[in-house]
Amino acid sequence: MKRNNKIQKLSIIGGGPAGLASAYFAHKNGLKFELFEGNSEIGGNCKTVEHKNFKFDLGAHRFHDKNKYVTSIVRNLLNDDLKLVSTPSKIFYKGKMITFPIEFKNLLKKLDSKIILKILIENGINIFNQNKINSFNDLVIKRYGSTLSTLFINNYSKKLWGIDTTLLSPKISGGRLKNLNIISIINIFSNRKHFEGFFYYPKNGFGMIFDKIKEEIQNNNIFLNSNVTKIFHNDNKINAIEINDNKKIEVDQIINSLPINIIANILEPKIPSKILDIVNTLKFRNLRIVVIFLKMKNFSNYASIYFPDENVN
Ligand SMILES: Cc1cc2nc3c(=O)[nH]c(=O)nc-3n(C[C@H](O)[C@H](O)[C@H](O)COP(=O)(O)OP(=O)(O)OC[C@H]3O[C@@H](n4cnc5c(N)ncnc54)[C@H](O)[C@@H]3O)c2cc1C
Protein backbone atom coordinates (compact mmCIF):
# COMPACT_ATOMS: atom_id res chain seq x y z
CA MET A 1 0.00 0.00 0.00
CA LYS A 2 1.47 3.38 -0.97
CA ARG A 3 1.31 6.27 1.43
CA ASN A 4 -1.49 8.53 0.30
CA ASN A 5 -1.64 11.91 2.00
CA LYS A 6 -5.32 12.22 1.17
CA ILE A 7 -6.19 9.31 3.47
CA GLN A 8 -6.82 10.63 6.97
CA LYS A 9 -7.86 7.32 8.46
CA LEU A 10 -8.56 3.80 7.29
CA SER A 11 -11.50 1.95 8.80
CA ILE A 12 -11.06 -1.78 8.36
CA ILE A 13 -14.02 -4.12 8.67
CA GLY A 14 -13.23 -7.66 9.85
CA GLY A 15 -10.31 -8.95 11.90
CA GLY A 16 -9.55 -12.13 9.95
CA PRO A 17 -6.32 -12.53 7.93
CA ALA A 18 -7.46 -10.04 5.25
CA GLY A 19 -8.44 -7.29 7.70
CA LEU A 20 -5.36 -7.84 9.86
CA ALA A 21 -3.04 -7.79 6.84
CA SER A 22 -4.57 -4.44 5.81
CA ALA A 23 -4.04 -3.13 9.34
CA TYR A 24 -0.45 -4.41 9.33
CA PHE A 25 0.42 -2.52 6.13
CA ALA A 26 -1.43 0.60 7.30
CA HIS A 27 0.65 0.48 10.49
CA LYS A 28 3.90 -0.08 8.56
CA ASN A 29 3.10 2.86 6.29
CA GLY A 30 2.24 5.18 9.15
CA LEU A 31 -1.45 5.45 8.23
CA LYS A 32 -4.00 5.99 10.97
CA PHE A 33 -6.40 3.08 11.10
CA GLU A 34 -9.08 1.39 13.17
CA LEU A 35 -10.22 -2.19 12.81
CA PHE A 36 -13.70 -3.44 13.73
CA GLU A 37 -14.11 -7.13 14.51
CA GLY A 38 -17.53 -8.55 15.35
CA ASN A 39 -16.15 -11.43 17.39
CA SER A 40 -14.43 -11.35 20.79
CA GLU A 41 -11.16 -12.48 19.16
CA ILE A 42 -9.25 -11.73 15.99
CA GLY A 43 -8.17 -14.36 13.44
CA GLY A 44 -11.44 -15.22 11.67
CA ASN A 45 -11.29 -18.71 10.19
CA CYS A 46 -7.57 -18.88 10.95
CA LYS A 47 -7.89 -18.85 14.73
CA THR A 48 -6.22 -21.41 16.94
CA VAL A 49 -8.58 -22.26 19.77
CA GLU A 50 -7.37 -23.44 23.17
CA HIS A 51 -9.40 -25.81 25.31
CA LYS A 52 -8.01 -27.31 28.51
CA ASN A 53 -4.39 -27.06 27.28
CA PHE A 54 -5.29 -28.55 23.89
CA LYS A 55 -4.88 -26.32 20.89
CA PHE A 56 -6.68 -26.80 17.60
CA ASP A 57 -7.16 -24.82 14.40
CA LEU A 58 -10.53 -24.19 12.79
CA GLY A 59 -9.87 -26.84 10.14
CA ALA A 60 -6.42 -27.96 9.01
CA HIS A 61 -4.46 -24.82 8.12
CA ARG A 62 -0.91 -24.61 6.81
CA PHE A 63 1.21 -21.81 5.44
CA HIS A 64 2.43 -22.41 1.88
CA ASP A 65 5.52 -20.59 0.69
CA LYS A 66 3.88 -19.17 -2.43
CA ASN A 67 5.01 -15.58 -2.28
CA LYS A 68 8.54 -14.82 -1.08
CA TYR A 69 7.57 -11.36 0.20
CA VAL A 70 4.64 -12.64 2.26
CA THR A 71 6.72 -15.53 3.59
CA SER A 72 9.48 -13.15 4.65
CA ILE A 73 6.98 -10.99 6.57
CA VAL A 74 5.55 -14.00 8.39
CA ARG A 75 9.07 -15.31 9.07
CA ASN A 76 10.12 -11.95 10.53
CA LEU A 77 7.04 -11.89 12.73
CA LEU A 78 7.47 -15.39 14.11
CA ASN A 79 11.23 -15.99 13.82
CA ASP A 80 12.09 -19.43 15.21
CA ASP A 81 8.44 -20.09 16.07
CA LEU A 82 7.71 -20.62 12.36
CA LYS A 83 8.61 -24.23 11.64
CA LEU A 84 9.21 -25.82 8.26
CA VAL A 85 7.24 -29.05 8.33
CA SER A 86 7.74 -31.99 6.03
CA THR A 87 4.61 -34.07 6.41
CA PRO A 88 2.69 -35.56 3.51
CA SER A 89 -1.07 -35.98 3.42
CA LYS A 90 -2.81 -39.23 2.59
CA ILE A 91 -5.90 -40.37 0.72
CA PHE A 92 -7.76 -43.26 2.37
CA TYR A 93 -8.66 -45.65 -0.46
CA LYS A 94 -10.03 -49.15 0.17
CA GLY A 95 -8.11 -49.49 3.43
CA LYS A 96 -4.86 -48.16 1.91
CA MET A 97 -3.12 -44.85 2.45
CA ILE A 98 -2.21 -43.21 -0.87
CA THR A 99 0.25 -40.33 -0.72
CA PHE A 100 -1.19 -36.94 -1.66
CA PRO A 101 -0.25 -35.06 -3.81
CA ILE A 102 -0.23 -38.22 -5.87
CA GLU A 103 3.18 -39.79 -6.56
CA PHE A 104 3.56 -42.47 -9.18
CA LYS A 105 6.06 -44.46 -7.13
CA ASN A 106 3.53 -44.72 -4.31
CA LEU A 107 0.70 -45.70 -6.68
CA LEU A 108 2.79 -48.58 -8.01
CA LYS A 109 2.90 -50.06 -4.51
CA LYS A 110 -0.74 -49.47 -3.67
CA LEU A 111 -2.83 -50.08 -6.80
CA ASP A 112 -3.76 -53.06 -8.92
CA SER A 113 -1.59 -53.52 -12.06
CA LYS A 114 -4.61 -53.15 -14.40
CA ILE A 115 -5.41 -49.77 -12.89
CA ILE A 116 -1.74 -48.76 -13.13
CA LEU A 117 -1.72 -49.64 -16.83
CA LYS A 118 -4.85 -47.55 -17.42
CA ILE A 119 -3.31 -44.64 -15.54
CA LEU A 120 -0.10 -44.92 -17.58
CA ILE A 121 -1.96 -44.97 -20.90
CA GLU A 122 -4.17 -42.02 -19.93
CA ASN A 123 -1.24 -39.96 -18.71
CA GLY A 124 0.81 -40.88 -21.78
CA ILE A 125 -2.02 -39.63 -24.01
CA ASN A 126 -2.31 -36.56 -21.79
CA ILE A 127 1.11 -35.35 -22.96
CA PHE A 128 -0.55 -34.48 -26.26
CA ASN A 129 -3.76 -33.21 -24.65
CA GLN A 130 -4.29 -29.65 -25.88
CA ASN A 131 -7.88 -29.37 -24.59
CA LYS A 132 -8.85 -26.04 -23.10
CA ILE A 133 -9.32 -26.09 -19.34
CA ASN A 134 -12.71 -24.64 -18.45
CA SER A 135 -13.47 -26.41 -15.20
CA PHE A 136 -11.80 -28.11 -12.25
CA ASN A 137 -12.84 -31.42 -13.81
CA ASP A 138 -10.97 -30.53 -17.05
CA LEU A 139 -7.92 -29.61 -15.00
CA VAL A 140 -7.72 -32.84 -12.99
CA ILE A 141 -8.33 -34.98 -16.07
CA LYS A 142 -5.53 -33.16 -17.87
CA ARG A 143 -3.22 -33.51 -14.86
CA TYR A 144 -4.03 -37.04 -13.75
CA GLY A 145 -6.18 -38.74 -16.41
CA SER A 146 -9.76 -39.83 -15.81
CA THR A 147 -9.01 -42.95 -13.71
CA LEU A 148 -7.04 -41.14 -11.00
CA SER A 149 -9.42 -38.19 -11.11
CA THR A 150 -12.42 -40.44 -10.55
CA LEU A 151 -10.74 -42.51 -7.84
CA PHE A 152 -9.22 -39.81 -5.71
CA ILE A 153 -10.02 -36.26 -6.68
CA ASN A 154 -13.46 -35.61 -8.12
CA ASN A 155 -15.52 -37.32 -5.40
CA TYR A 156 -13.64 -35.58 -2.64
CA SER A 157 -13.87 -32.17 -4.33
CA LYS A 158 -17.60 -32.63 -4.91
CA LYS A 159 -18.07 -33.41 -1.21
CA LEU A 160 -15.98 -30.40 -0.22
CA TRP A 161 -17.56 -27.83 -2.52
CA GLY A 162 -21.05 -29.30 -2.71
CA ILE A 163 -21.28 -29.21 -6.51
CA ASP A 164 -20.09 -31.30 -9.42
CA THR A 165 -16.48 -30.64 -10.44
CA THR A 166 -17.58 -29.81 -14.00
CA LEU A 167 -19.17 -26.68 -12.49
CA LEU A 168 -16.14 -25.71 -10.39
CA SER A 169 -13.49 -23.26 -11.50
CA PRO A 170 -9.97 -24.65 -12.16
CA LYS A 171 -8.71 -21.93 -9.80
CA ILE A 172 -9.90 -23.83 -6.71
CA SER A 173 -6.87 -26.12 -6.97
CA GLY A 174 -4.74 -23.18 -5.83
CA GLY A 175 -1.95 -24.53 -8.06
CA ARG A 176 -1.60 -27.47 -5.70
CA LEU A 177 -2.30 -30.22 -8.21
CA LYS A 178 1.08 -31.18 -9.54
CA ASN A 179 1.41 -32.96 -12.84
CA LEU A 180 1.62 -36.70 -12.81
CA ASN A 181 3.30 -36.68 -16.18
CA ILE A 182 6.16 -38.32 -17.96
CA ILE A 183 8.60 -36.27 -15.83
CA SER A 184 7.25 -37.68 -12.58
CA ILE A 185 7.33 -41.16 -14.08
CA ILE A 186 10.97 -40.73 -15.10
CA ASN A 187 11.64 -39.50 -11.57
CA ILE A 188 10.03 -42.64 -10.24
CA PHE A 189 13.16 -43.99 -8.60
CA SER A 190 14.59 -40.73 -7.41
CA ASN A 191 14.10 -39.71 -3.82
CA ARG A 192 13.24 -36.14 -4.74
CA LYS A 193 10.99 -34.73 -2.03
CA HIS A 194 7.67 -33.38 -3.20
CA PHE A 195 7.25 -29.64 -2.76
CA GLU A 196 3.73 -30.09 -1.43
CA GLY A 197 4.93 -32.24 1.46
CA PHE A 198 6.58 -29.08 2.84
CA PHE A 199 4.79 -26.22 4.48
CA TYR A 200 5.29 -23.75 7.28
CA TYR A 201 3.43 -24.04 10.53
CA PRO A 202 3.75 -21.88 13.66
CA LYS A 203 4.83 -23.59 16.86
CA ASN A 204 1.58 -22.81 18.73
CA GLY A 205 -0.95 -23.20 15.92
CA PHE A 206 -1.84 -21.33 12.74
CA GLY A 207 -3.56 -18.54 14.70
CA MET A 208 -0.17 -17.51 16.09
CA ILE A 209 0.52 -15.62 12.83
CA PHE A 210 -2.47 -13.38 13.44
CA ASP A 211 -1.85 -12.99 17.17
CA LYS A 212 1.64 -11.74 16.26
CA ILE A 213 0.22 -9.27 13.74
CA LYS A 214 -2.15 -8.01 16.44
CA GLU A 215 0.79 -7.56 18.82
CA GLU A 216 2.80 -5.76 16.14
CA ILE A 217 0.07 -3.27 15.21
CA GLN A 218 -0.83 -2.34 18.77
CA ASN A 219 -4.06 -3.48 20.27
CA ASN A 220 -5.62 -0.10 20.91
CA ASN A 221 -6.55 0.30 17.24
CA ILE A 222 -8.50 -2.96 17.24
CA PHE A 223 -12.10 -2.91 18.40
CA LEU A 224 -13.40 -6.36 19.30
CA ASN A 225 -17.09 -7.23 19.79
CA SER A 226 -17.76 -4.52 17.23
CA ASN A 227 -20.14 -5.87 14.67
CA VAL A 228 -20.57 -3.54 11.71
CA THR A 229 -24.34 -3.48 11.30
CA LYS A 230 -24.78 -0.68 8.76
CA ILE A 231 -22.66 1.03 6.14
CA PHE A 232 -23.92 4.48 5.20
CA HIS A 233 -23.21 5.80 1.73
CA ASN A 234 -24.02 8.88 -0.24
CA ASP A 235 -22.99 9.96 -3.73
CA ASN A 236 -20.99 6.75 -4.33
CA LYS A 237 -18.97 7.30 -1.17
CA ILE A 238 -19.14 5.48 2.15
CA ASN A 239 -19.24 8.09 4.89
CA ALA A 240 -20.17 6.28 8.10
CA ILE A 241 -20.61 2.87 9.68
CA GLU A 242 -22.82 1.69 12.50
CA ILE A 243 -21.47 -0.60 15.22
CA ASN A 244 -23.67 -3.08 17.12
CA ASP A 245 -26.92 -1.47 15.93
CA ASN A 246 -26.34 1.74 17.86
CA LYS A 247 -23.04 3.60 17.52
CA LYS A 248 -22.53 5.63 14.33
CA ILE A 249 -18.92 6.40 13.36
CA GLU A 250 -17.83 8.76 10.58
CA VAL A 251 -15.28 7.18 8.24
CA ASP A 252 -12.84 8.50 5.68
CA GLN A 253 -11.75 5.40 3.71
CA ILE A 254 -12.83 1.87 4.44
CA ILE A 255 -11.38 -1.52 3.65
CA ASN A 256 -13.96 -4.26 3.75
CA SER A 257 -12.91 -7.88 4.24
CA LEU A 258 -16.41 -9.32 4.58
CA PRO A 259 -18.18 -11.40 1.95
CA ILE A 260 -20.18 -9.44 -0.60
CA ASN A 261 -23.52 -10.83 0.61
CA ILE A 262 -23.03 -9.39 4.11
CA ILE A 263 -21.94 -6.00 2.81
CA ALA A 264 -24.72 -5.77 0.22
CA ASN A 265 -27.31 -6.36 2.93
CA ILE A 266 -26.07 -3.71 5.35
CA LEU A 267 -25.64 -0.81 2.92
CA GLU A 268 -27.81 2.17 3.85
CA PRO A 269 -29.72 3.41 1.86
CA LYS A 270 -30.52 -0.08 0.60
CA ILE A 271 -29.22 -1.06 -2.82
CA PRO A 272 -31.83 -1.89 -5.52
CA SER A 273 -33.73 -5.07 -4.63
CA LYS A 274 -32.95 -6.49 -8.09
CA ILE A 275 -29.22 -6.49 -7.22
CA LEU A 276 -29.81 -7.64 -3.66
CA ASP A 277 -31.83 -10.61 -4.91
CA ILE A 278 -28.92 -11.67 -7.14
CA VAL A 279 -26.37 -11.27 -4.32
CA ASN A 280 -28.58 -13.30 -1.99
CA THR A 281 -28.52 -16.25 -4.37
CA LEU A 282 -24.80 -16.74 -3.59
CA LYS A 283 -24.36 -20.01 -1.74
CA PHE A 284 -21.82 -20.65 1.02
CA ARG A 285 -20.68 -23.92 2.56
CA ASN A 286 -21.02 -24.39 6.28
CA LEU A 287 -18.18 -25.94 8.19
CA ARG A 288 -18.66 -28.35 11.06
CA ILE A 289 -15.53 -29.10 13.06
CA VAL A 290 -15.37 -32.13 15.32
CA VAL A 291 -12.40 -32.10 17.66
CA ILE A 292 -11.40 -35.24 19.55
CA PHE A 293 -8.92 -34.77 22.39
CA LEU A 294 -6.58 -37.74 22.76
CA LYS A 295 -4.11 -38.30 25.55
CA MET A 296 -1.14 -39.08 23.33
CA LYS A 297 1.76 -37.11 21.93
CA ASN A 298 1.24 -37.93 18.29
CA PHE A 299 -1.75 -39.66 16.70
CA SER A 300 -0.46 -39.87 13.13
CA ASN A 301 2.42 -38.65 11.00
CA TYR A 302 0.11 -37.37 8.28
CA ALA A 303 -0.82 -33.71 7.89
CA SER A 304 -4.33 -34.66 6.69
CA ILE A 305 -6.21 -37.76 5.61
CA TYR A 306 -8.76 -37.36 2.80
CA PHE A 307 -11.74 -39.68 2.36
CA PRO A 308 -12.88 -39.56 -1.29
CA ASP A 309 -15.40 -42.40 -0.78
CA GLU A 310 -18.80 -40.79 -1.38
CA ASN A 311 -20.34 -42.97 1.33
CA VAL A 312 -18.11 -41.40 3.98
CA ASN A 313 -19.68 -38.09 4.86
C1 LIG B 1 -11.24 -25.95 6.67
C2 LIG B 1 -10.40 -24.83 6.10
C3 LIG B 1 -9.05 -25.04 5.86
C4 LIG B 1 -8.26 -24.02 5.33
N1 LIG B 1 -6.92 -24.24 5.14
C5 LIG B 1 -6.13 -23.23 4.73
C6 LIG B 1 -4.72 -23.41 4.63
O1 LIG B 1 -4.19 -24.50 4.88
N2 LIG B 1 -3.95 -22.35 4.25
C7 LIG B 1 -4.53 -21.13 3.94
O2 LIG B 1 -3.78 -20.19 3.59
N3 LIG B 1 -5.88 -20.93 4.00
C8 LIG B 1 -6.68 -21.94 4.39
N4 LIG B 1 -8.04 -21.75 4.49
C9 LIG B 1 -8.60 -20.46 4.07
C10 LIG B 1 -8.50 -19.38 5.15
O3 LIG B 1 -9.11 -19.82 6.35
C11 LIG B 1 -9.23 -18.13 4.61
O4 LIG B 1 -8.67 -17.79 3.36
C12 LIG B 1 -9.08 -16.95 5.53
O5 LIG B 1 -9.61 -17.21 6.81
C13 LIG B 1 -9.83 -15.76 4.90
O6 LIG B 1 -9.58 -14.63 5.69
P1 LIG B 1 -10.57 -13.39 5.69
O7 LIG B 1 -9.99 -12.37 6.58
O8 LIG B 1 -10.88 -13.02 4.29
O9 LIG B 1 -11.97 -13.96 6.26
P2 LIG B 1 -12.32 -14.60 7.67
O10 LIG B 1 -11.24 -15.48 8.17
O11 LIG B 1 -13.68 -15.20 7.48
O12 LIG B 1 -12.44 -13.35 8.63
C14 LIG B 1 -13.51 -12.46 8.56
C15 LIG B 1 -13.62 -11.76 9.91
O13 LIG B 1 -14.64 -10.78 9.83
C16 LIG B 1 -15.44 -10.84 11.02
N5 LIG B 1 -16.78 -10.31 10.72
C17 LIG B 1 -17.79 -10.93 10.05
N6 LIG B 1 -18.86 -10.11 9.94
C18 LIG B 1 -18.51 -8.95 10.56
C19 LIG B 1 -19.17 -7.70 10.76
N7 LIG B 1 -20.41 -7.47 10.30
N8 LIG B 1 -18.51 -6.72 11.43
C20 LIG B 1 -17.24 -6.91 11.89
N9 LIG B 1 -16.57 -8.07 11.72
C21 LIG B 1 -17.19 -9.07 11.06
C22 LIG B 1 -15.44 -12.31 11.38
O14 LIG B 1 -15.75 -12.51 12.76
C23 LIG B 1 -14.00 -12.71 11.05
O15 LIG B 1 -13.12 -12.53 12.14
C24 LIG B 1 -8.86 -22.77 5.00
C25 LIG B 1 -10.22 -22.56 5.24
C26 LIG B 1 -10.98 -23.57 5.79
C27 LIG B 1 -12.45 -23.32 6.03
Image (spheres, rainbow, N blue to C red):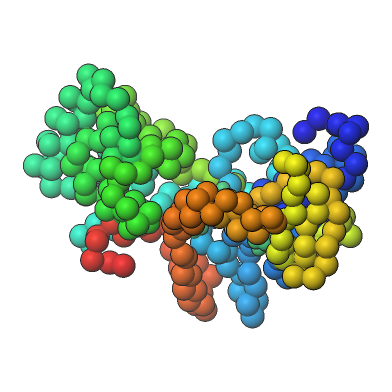
Residue sitting farthest toward the left? 114
Looking at the rendered image, the quarter that the C terminus falls into is bottom left
Could you say where residue 264 lies in the image, as x and y percent from the top left? 60, 53
> Would residue 186 be found to the left or right of residue 160 on screen?
left
Residue 48 or residue 283, whichever sits in front: 283
- Is residue 140 something one can see in this rendering? no
Answer with the quadrant where ligand 1 appears in the image.
Answer: bottom right
Residue 23 or residue 249, whichever sits in front: 249
Residue name at image x 24 percent, y 57 percent: 93
Could you say where residue 271 lies in the image, as x and y percent from the top left? 61, 51
Residue name at image x 35 percent, y 44 percent: 168
- Is residue 305 something one can see in this rendering? yes
Image height of 41 relative to 66, above or below: below
Image height of 268 relative to 187, above or below: below
Residue 13 or residue 181, whichever sits in front: 13
Residue 269 sits in quarter: bottom right
Could you say where residue 223 lies in the image, as x and y percent from the top left? 81, 63
Residue name at image x 81 percent, y 49 percent: 239
Looking at the rendered image, the quarter that the N terminus falls into is top right
Residue 255 or residue 47, whichever sits in front: 255
> Would residue 282 be found to the left or right of residue 65 on screen?
left
